[in-house]
Amino acid sequence: MATLTPDRLLSLEHDGWASLCEGRGGRFYGGLMTPDGLMVLVDGSVLDRATIAATLDAAPPWDSYEIREPRRVDLGEGAAALVYRARAVRGDQGFVAWMSSTYRLLDGEPRLALYQQTTVTH
């Protein structure tokens, strides 16, 4: 059975960012998210798993990313969140935000239930 250790959660986040850099985010997150999972993006969009799976592969890939200051938050039996500051670059545009990824064990495997971005303005 998988666990939601800080290292495991950070590994999942790196895998997700790698998929976004390689243009396969829809496939990756379509498999990682819970059936009722949501992503809340900085532009105000709230996307469900089906929308993510159907559209994210067509998004322009990120050129690079960094994860800083990761912190694990215990949410009880079989659930945890990872909060971190991310910096990503696509072309000449940069993006800095706090990310919050909430995972729960589903059939013994970590699955992403809720993801939220909050833009850093300072």
Image: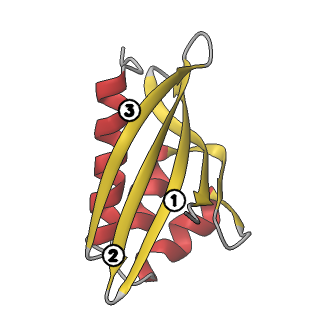
| Res. 89 mark | 2
Query: Could you tell which of marks 1 and 2 lies nearer the N-terminus?
Result: 2
Query: Could you tell which of marks 3 and 1 lies nearer the N-terminus?
Result: 3
Residue 88 rendering spot, x and y as whole percentages: 36, 68
Q: Image quadrant of residue 36? A: top right
Q: Image quadrant of residue 24? A: bottom left
Mark-to-mark CA distance, 2 and 3: 22 Å
* Residue at which label 1 appears: 97
Which residue is at 31% across, 88% downward? 91
Q: Quadrant of the N terminus?
A: top left
| Nearer mark to the viewer, of 3 and 1 | 1
Which residue is at 38% across, 62% downward? 87
Residue type indicated by callout 3: Leu
Residue 20 rendering spot, x and y as whole percentages: 35, 67
| Front in this rendered view, residue 25 or 88 | 88
| Nearer mark to the viewer, of 2 and 3 | 2
| Res. 9 mark | 3
Residue 7 rendering spot, x and y as whole percentages: 29, 27
Q: Pointer 3: residues within 10 angstroms few (<14), some, or many (20+)?
A: many
Q: Farthest residue toward the bottom?
A: 92
Mark-to-mark CA distance, 3 and 1: 18 Å
Q: Is residue 65 left or right of residue 30?
A: left
Q: Is residue 21 left or right of residue 71?
A: left
Q: Is residue 22 left or right of residue 122?
A: left
Quick check: marks 2 and 3 in contact, CB under 8 Å?
A: no
